[in-house]
Image (cartoon, rainbow, N blue to C red):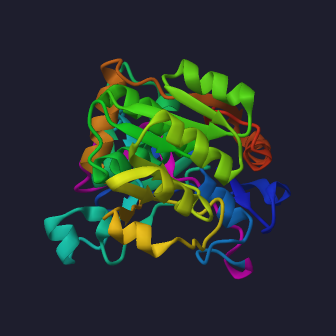
Amino acid sequence: MRVAAFTELGGPEGVETIERDEPEAGDGEAVVEVRACSVNRHDLWILENESPLVNESTLPFVSGLDVAGVVREAGDAASVSEGDRVVLCPNQTCGECEFCREGPENLCRSFMLYHGGFAERVAVDSSRLIELPESVGFVDAATLPTAYLTAWHMLRKADVSAGDLVFVPGATGGVGVATVQLCDVIGARTVGTSTSAEKLERLAALGCDHTVESGNVDEIVGEVRAVGPVDAAINHLAGEFTQAALDVTKRGGTQVICGRTAGATSKFFAPNFFLSQKEIVGSTMGTQPELEKLVRLVADGRLEPVVGATYGLDETRDAFADMDSRDAFGKLVVEPNN
Protein backbone atom coordinates (compact mmCIF):
# COMPACT_ATOMS: atom_id res chain seq x y z
CA MET A 1 0.00 0.00 0.00
CA ARG A 2 1.27 3.48 -0.85
CA VAL A 3 1.46 6.39 1.56
CA ALA A 4 2.79 9.94 1.25
CA ALA A 5 5.18 10.17 4.18
CA PHE A 6 7.42 12.81 5.73
CA THR A 7 10.85 11.22 5.36
CA GLU A 8 12.74 14.32 6.47
CA LEU A 9 11.66 17.51 8.21
CA GLY A 10 12.12 21.03 6.92
CA GLY A 11 9.91 21.57 3.90
CA PRO A 12 7.93 20.05 1.01
CA GLU A 13 11.00 18.30 -0.40
CA GLY A 14 10.76 15.96 2.59
CA VAL A 15 7.51 14.35 1.32
CA GLU A 16 7.90 11.03 -0.50
CA THR A 17 5.61 8.23 -1.64
CA ILE A 18 6.64 4.98 0.05
CA GLU A 19 5.20 1.51 0.67
CA ARG A 20 3.63 0.39 3.95
CA ASP A 21 1.85 -2.75 5.11
CA GLU A 22 -1.89 -2.96 4.57
CA PRO A 23 -3.91 -1.88 7.64
CA GLU A 24 -6.18 -4.35 9.42
CA ALA A 25 -9.33 -3.57 11.35
CA GLY A 26 -9.13 -4.35 15.06
CA ASP A 27 -12.06 -4.49 17.45
CA GLY A 28 -14.22 -1.42 16.98
CA GLU A 29 -12.16 -0.29 14.00
CA ALA A 30 -12.77 0.01 10.27
CA VAL A 31 -10.46 0.07 7.27
CA VAL A 32 -11.34 2.99 5.01
CA GLU A 33 -10.29 3.35 1.40
CA VAL A 34 -9.24 6.99 1.35
CA ARG A 35 -10.86 8.90 -1.48
CA ALA A 36 -9.83 12.35 -0.23
CA CYS A 37 -7.75 13.92 2.54
CA SER A 38 -7.18 17.65 2.81
CA VAL A 39 -3.91 19.41 3.68
CA ASN A 40 -3.91 21.69 6.70
CA ARG A 41 -1.53 24.21 8.24
CA HIS A 42 -1.23 21.70 11.08
CA ASP A 43 0.35 19.20 8.66
CA LEU A 44 2.73 21.83 7.34
CA TRP A 45 3.87 22.76 10.85
CA ILE A 46 4.77 19.11 11.45
CA LEU A 47 6.65 18.96 8.15
CA GLU A 48 8.54 22.15 9.00
CA ASN A 49 9.63 20.65 12.33
CA GLU A 50 7.51 23.09 14.34
CA SER A 51 5.47 20.49 16.21
CA PRO A 52 6.47 18.44 19.27
CA LEU A 53 4.50 15.52 17.84
CA VAL A 54 7.20 14.47 15.41
CA ASN A 55 11.00 14.51 15.31
CA GLU A 56 13.72 12.80 13.32
CA SER A 57 13.40 9.64 15.43
CA THR A 58 9.73 9.17 14.47
CA LEU A 59 10.25 9.36 10.69
CA PRO A 60 8.86 8.34 8.29
CA PHE A 61 5.62 9.93 9.49
CA VAL A 62 2.28 9.96 7.69
CA SER A 63 0.13 13.00 8.43
CA GLY A 64 -3.35 13.84 7.20
CA LEU A 65 -6.33 14.41 9.51
CA ASP A 66 -9.30 14.85 7.22
CA VAL A 67 -10.18 11.44 5.78
CA ALA A 68 -13.19 10.78 3.56
CA GLY A 69 -13.77 7.50 1.81
CA VAL A 70 -15.45 4.10 1.72
CA VAL A 71 -15.40 1.42 4.42
CA ARG A 72 -13.66 -1.68 3.03
CA GLU A 73 -13.47 -3.74 6.23
CA ALA A 74 -15.36 -3.52 9.52
CA GLY A 75 -13.86 -5.12 12.62
CA ASP A 76 -15.76 -6.76 15.46
CA ALA A 77 -18.11 -4.34 17.23
CA ALA A 78 -17.58 -1.72 14.53
CA SER A 79 -20.32 0.88 14.22
CA VAL A 80 -20.15 0.96 10.40
CA SER A 81 -20.56 -1.54 7.58
CA GLU A 82 -18.57 -2.40 4.47
CA GLY A 83 -19.46 -0.04 1.65
CA ASP A 84 -20.48 2.89 3.84
CA ARG A 85 -19.46 6.33 2.60
CA VAL A 86 -17.87 8.14 5.54
CA VAL A 87 -15.87 11.10 6.79
CA LEU A 88 -13.63 10.85 9.85
CA CYS A 89 -13.86 13.14 12.86
CA PRO A 90 -10.13 13.27 13.73
CA ASN A 91 -10.67 13.94 17.44
CA GLN A 92 -9.00 11.42 19.73
CA THR A 93 -10.12 11.56 23.36
CA CYS A 94 -9.66 9.50 26.52
CA GLY A 95 -13.39 8.89 27.04
CA GLU A 96 -12.94 9.04 30.80
CA CYS A 97 -12.24 12.61 31.97
CA GLU A 98 -14.96 15.04 33.03
CA PHE A 99 -14.91 16.76 29.63
CA CYS A 100 -15.44 13.49 27.79
CA ARG A 101 -18.31 12.70 30.18
CA GLU A 102 -19.93 16.12 30.26
CA GLY A 103 -18.54 17.87 27.16
CA PRO A 104 -17.30 19.51 25.15
CA GLU A 105 -15.10 16.63 24.06
CA ASN A 106 -12.42 18.88 22.55
CA LEU A 107 -11.54 19.94 26.11
CA CYS A 108 -10.49 16.35 26.89
CA ARG A 109 -7.40 16.32 29.10
CA SER A 110 -5.72 13.92 26.65
CA PHE A 111 -7.05 15.51 23.46
CA MET A 112 -5.14 14.50 20.34
CA LEU A 113 -5.77 14.34 16.62
CA TYR A 114 -5.69 11.41 14.21
CA HIS A 115 -2.84 11.36 11.68
CA GLY A 116 -2.33 9.01 8.74
CA GLY A 117 -4.76 10.07 6.02
CA PHE A 118 -2.24 10.57 3.22
CA ALA A 119 -2.52 6.88 2.36
CA GLU A 120 -4.50 4.60 0.12
CA ARG A 121 -6.16 2.92 3.11
CA VAL A 122 -6.32 3.58 6.85
CA ALA A 123 -7.56 1.80 9.97
CA VAL A 124 -9.55 4.12 12.23
CA ASP A 125 -11.85 4.10 15.25
CA SER A 126 -15.24 3.35 13.69
CA SER A 127 -17.09 5.42 16.29
CA ARG A 128 -15.42 8.51 14.80
CA LEU A 129 -16.85 7.87 11.33
CA ILE A 130 -19.80 9.95 10.13
CA GLU A 131 -21.98 8.64 7.31
CA LEU A 132 -22.00 10.74 4.16
CA PRO A 133 -25.20 11.26 2.16
CA GLU A 134 -24.82 10.51 -1.55
CA SER A 135 -25.15 14.24 -2.24
CA VAL A 136 -21.89 15.00 -0.40
CA GLY A 137 -18.77 14.29 -2.45
CA PHE A 138 -15.60 12.94 -0.89
CA VAL A 139 -13.51 16.00 -1.74
CA ASP A 140 -16.06 18.35 -0.19
CA ALA A 141 -16.32 16.13 2.88
CA ALA A 142 -12.54 16.12 3.34
CA THR A 143 -12.50 19.92 3.62
CA LEU A 144 -14.74 19.90 6.71
CA PRO A 145 -13.09 18.20 9.72
CA THR A 146 -10.35 20.74 10.42
CA ALA A 147 -10.89 24.14 8.75
CA TYR A 148 -14.69 24.30 8.70
CA LEU A 149 -15.12 22.55 12.04
CA THR A 150 -12.62 24.90 13.67
CA ALA A 151 -14.36 27.95 12.22
CA TRP A 152 -17.83 26.72 13.23
CA HIS A 153 -16.75 26.02 16.82
CA MET A 154 -15.11 29.46 17.06
CA LEU A 155 -18.26 31.18 15.85
CA ARG A 156 -20.27 29.28 18.43
CA LYS A 157 -17.85 30.21 21.21
CA ALA A 158 -18.21 33.87 20.21
CA ASP A 159 -22.01 33.45 20.14
CA VAL A 160 -22.21 34.96 16.65
CA SER A 161 -25.75 35.45 15.36
CA ALA A 162 -27.52 37.06 12.43
CA GLY A 163 -26.63 40.72 11.94
CA ASP A 164 -23.36 40.57 13.91
CA LEU A 165 -20.18 42.01 12.39
CA VAL A 166 -17.28 39.55 12.44
CA PHE A 167 -13.64 40.55 11.85
CA VAL A 168 -11.56 37.88 10.07
CA PRO A 169 -7.85 38.74 9.76
CA GLY A 170 -6.09 36.58 7.19
CA ALA A 171 -9.46 35.75 5.72
CA THR A 172 -8.18 34.00 2.60
CA GLY A 173 -6.65 31.04 4.49
CA GLY A 174 -8.54 27.82 5.16
CA VAL A 175 -10.14 28.85 8.46
CA GLY A 176 -10.72 32.38 7.15
CA VAL A 177 -12.59 31.28 4.04
CA ALA A 178 -14.61 28.83 6.12
CA THR A 179 -15.50 31.59 8.59
CA VAL A 180 -16.73 33.91 5.85
CA GLN A 181 -18.90 31.18 4.33
CA LEU A 182 -20.32 30.07 7.67
CA CYS A 183 -21.09 33.65 8.66
CA ASP A 184 -23.05 33.90 5.43
CA VAL A 185 -24.99 30.78 6.47
CA ILE A 186 -25.70 32.32 9.89
CA GLY A 187 -26.57 35.73 8.46
CA ALA A 188 -23.67 37.55 10.08
CA ARG A 189 -21.65 40.22 8.27
CA THR A 190 -17.89 39.92 7.76
CA VAL A 191 -14.87 42.13 7.21
CA GLY A 192 -11.87 40.15 5.97
CA THR A 193 -8.25 41.05 5.29
CA SER A 194 -5.56 39.83 2.93
CA THR A 195 -2.53 41.20 1.10
CA SER A 196 -3.87 39.78 -2.18
CA ALA A 197 -6.41 41.80 -4.16
CA GLU A 198 -7.19 38.77 -6.32
CA LYS A 199 -8.00 36.61 -3.30
CA LEU A 200 -10.14 39.33 -1.78
CA GLU A 201 -12.19 39.49 -4.98
CA ARG A 202 -12.86 35.78 -4.65
CA LEU A 203 -13.65 36.22 -0.96
CA ALA A 204 -16.19 38.93 -1.75
CA ALA A 205 -17.84 36.58 -4.26
CA LEU A 206 -18.28 34.09 -1.40
CA GLY A 207 -20.17 36.65 0.67
CA CYS A 208 -17.55 38.72 2.50
CA ASP A 209 -19.25 42.09 3.04
CA HIS A 210 -16.13 44.25 3.48
CA THR A 211 -12.54 43.56 2.44
CA VAL A 212 -9.29 45.22 3.46
CA GLU A 213 -6.21 44.78 1.29
CA SER A 214 -3.35 45.21 3.75
CA GLY A 215 -0.96 43.36 6.03
CA ASN A 216 -0.25 46.42 8.16
CA VAL A 217 -2.09 46.12 11.46
CA ASP A 218 -2.45 49.88 12.01
CA GLU A 219 -3.94 50.35 8.57
CA ILE A 220 -6.23 47.34 9.11
CA VAL A 221 -7.49 48.72 12.42
CA GLY A 222 -8.34 52.04 10.79
CA GLU A 223 -10.17 50.41 7.88
CA VAL A 224 -12.15 48.04 10.10
CA ARG A 225 -13.15 50.81 12.52
CA ALA A 226 -14.53 52.72 9.55
CA VAL A 227 -16.87 49.79 8.85
CA GLY A 228 -18.27 49.75 12.38
CA PRO A 229 -17.95 48.16 15.82
CA VAL A 230 -17.02 44.48 15.62
CA ASP A 231 -19.01 41.96 17.64
CA ALA A 232 -16.52 39.10 17.27
CA ALA A 233 -13.05 38.48 15.86
CA ILE A 234 -12.10 35.05 14.51
CA ASN A 235 -8.32 35.03 14.70
CA HIS A 236 -6.16 32.18 13.39
CA LEU A 237 -3.07 34.41 13.13
CA ALA A 238 -2.35 35.51 16.74
CA GLY A 239 0.93 37.49 16.99
CA GLU A 240 0.34 41.21 16.48
CA PHE A 241 -3.19 40.57 15.22
CA THR A 242 -4.35 39.84 18.78
CA GLN A 243 -4.00 43.52 19.70
CA ALA A 244 -5.48 44.56 16.35
CA ALA A 245 -8.54 42.43 17.00
CA LEU A 246 -8.89 43.90 20.49
CA ASP A 247 -8.68 47.40 19.01
CA VAL A 248 -11.66 46.86 16.69
CA THR A 249 -13.99 44.77 18.85
CA LYS A 250 -16.75 46.62 20.65
CA ARG A 251 -17.20 46.87 24.42
CA GLY A 252 -17.99 43.38 25.63
CA GLY A 253 -16.92 41.89 22.28
CA THR A 254 -15.19 38.52 21.91
CA GLN A 255 -12.01 37.46 20.13
CA VAL A 256 -11.46 33.74 19.53
CA ILE A 257 -7.93 32.49 18.74
CA CYS A 258 -7.19 29.10 17.19
CA GLY A 259 -3.71 29.42 15.65
CA ARG A 260 -0.35 31.14 15.57
CA THR A 261 0.44 31.72 11.90
CA ALA A 262 1.61 35.29 12.61
CA GLY A 263 3.40 34.42 15.84
CA ALA A 264 3.14 32.19 18.90
CA THR A 265 3.37 35.15 21.29
CA SER A 266 1.00 38.11 21.52
CA LYS A 267 1.27 41.36 23.48
CA PHE A 268 -1.75 43.52 24.16
CA PHE A 269 -2.66 46.71 26.02
CA ALA A 270 -4.37 45.55 29.20
CA PRO A 271 -6.34 48.65 30.33
CA ASN A 272 -8.64 48.88 27.30
CA PHE A 273 -9.04 45.11 27.40
CA PHE A 274 -10.42 44.96 30.93
CA LEU A 275 -12.08 48.38 31.09
CA SER A 276 -14.09 47.52 27.98
CA GLN A 277 -14.76 44.03 29.36
CA LYS A 278 -13.67 42.28 26.19
CA GLU A 279 -12.97 38.58 26.02
CA ILE A 280 -10.14 36.56 24.47
CA VAL A 281 -11.06 32.90 24.12
CA GLY A 282 -8.95 29.97 22.98
CA SER A 283 -10.36 27.31 20.67
CA THR A 284 -9.17 23.99 19.25
CA MET A 285 -11.08 22.03 16.60
CA GLY A 286 -14.71 21.27 17.52
CA THR A 287 -16.97 18.38 18.44
CA GLN A 288 -18.23 15.41 16.45
CA PRO A 289 -21.88 16.60 16.61
CA GLU A 290 -20.72 19.92 15.14
CA LEU A 291 -19.04 18.08 12.26
CA GLU A 292 -22.26 16.17 11.69
CA LYS A 293 -24.03 19.54 11.47
CA LEU A 294 -21.57 20.71 8.81
CA VAL A 295 -22.15 17.56 6.77
CA ARG A 296 -25.89 18.32 6.87
CA LEU A 297 -25.28 21.90 5.74
CA VAL A 298 -23.40 20.60 2.69
CA ALA A 299 -26.02 17.93 2.00
CA ASP A 300 -28.78 20.56 2.17
CA GLY A 301 -26.95 22.84 -0.26
CA ARG A 302 -26.48 25.60 2.33
CA LEU A 303 -22.68 25.29 2.34
CA GLU A 304 -20.39 24.65 -0.62
CA PRO A 305 -16.79 24.19 0.57
CA VAL A 306 -14.14 25.95 -1.47
CA VAL A 307 -11.55 23.63 -3.01
CA GLY A 308 -8.42 25.29 -4.34
CA ALA A 309 -6.87 22.24 -6.01
CA THR A 310 -6.76 18.44 -5.91
CA TYR A 311 -3.69 16.19 -6.15
CA GLY A 312 -2.90 12.52 -6.61
CA LEU A 313 -1.00 10.74 -3.82
CA ASP A 314 2.26 11.08 -5.77
CA GLU A 315 1.65 14.83 -5.94
CA THR A 316 1.31 15.35 -2.17
CA ARG A 317 4.68 17.11 -2.14
CA ASP A 318 3.25 19.62 -4.63
CA ALA A 319 0.25 20.21 -2.38
CA PHE A 320 2.55 21.13 0.50
CA ALA A 321 4.64 23.35 -1.75
CA ASP A 322 1.51 25.19 -2.84
CA MET A 323 0.39 25.66 0.76
CA ASP A 324 3.85 26.83 1.77
CA SER A 325 3.89 29.43 -1.03
CA ARG A 326 0.58 30.88 0.28
CA ASP A 327 -0.67 31.19 -3.30
CA ALA A 328 -3.62 28.85 -2.80
CA PHE A 329 -7.20 29.93 -2.15
CA GLY A 330 -9.47 27.29 -0.67
CA LYS A 331 -8.66 23.83 0.57
CA LEU A 332 -5.96 21.68 -1.02
CA VAL A 333 -7.07 18.04 -1.18
CA VAL A 334 -5.13 14.84 -1.89
CA GLU A 335 -7.01 12.01 -3.60
CA PRO A 336 -4.97 8.87 -2.85
CA ASN A 337 -6.99 6.46 -4.97
CA ASN A 338 -7.47 8.62 -8.09
Quadrant of the image occupied by residue 336: top right
Q: Judge by depth and name the residue closer to the eye, 89 or 148.
A: 148
In percent of width and height, residue 172 lies at: 62, 37
Quadrant of the image occupied by residue 267: bottom right
In percent of width and height, residue 147 lies at: 49, 45
Can residue 206 be seen in this snapshot?
Answer: yes
- Residue found at x 15% / y 69%: 101
- Residue found at x 74% / y 65%: 48
Name above or below for residue 180 compared with residue 116. Answer: above
Quadrant of the image occupied by residue 276: bottom left
Q: Does the magenta stretch include residue 278?
A: no
Q: Furthest-left residue in view?
A: 102
- Residue found at x 33% / y 55%: 251
- Residue found at x 32% / y 78%: 109
Q: In this view, does 186 lie to the left or right of 51?
A: left
In percent of width and height, residue 26 lies at: 36, 62
Q: In this view, does 253 lie to the left or right of 198?
A: left
Look at the image and give the residue range highlighted in magenta. 56-80
Can residue 81 be seen in this snapshot?
Answer: no
Name above or below for residue 113 compared with residue 227. Answer: below
Q: Is residue 37 left or right of residue 283?
A: right
Q: Furthest-bottom residue in view?
A: 57
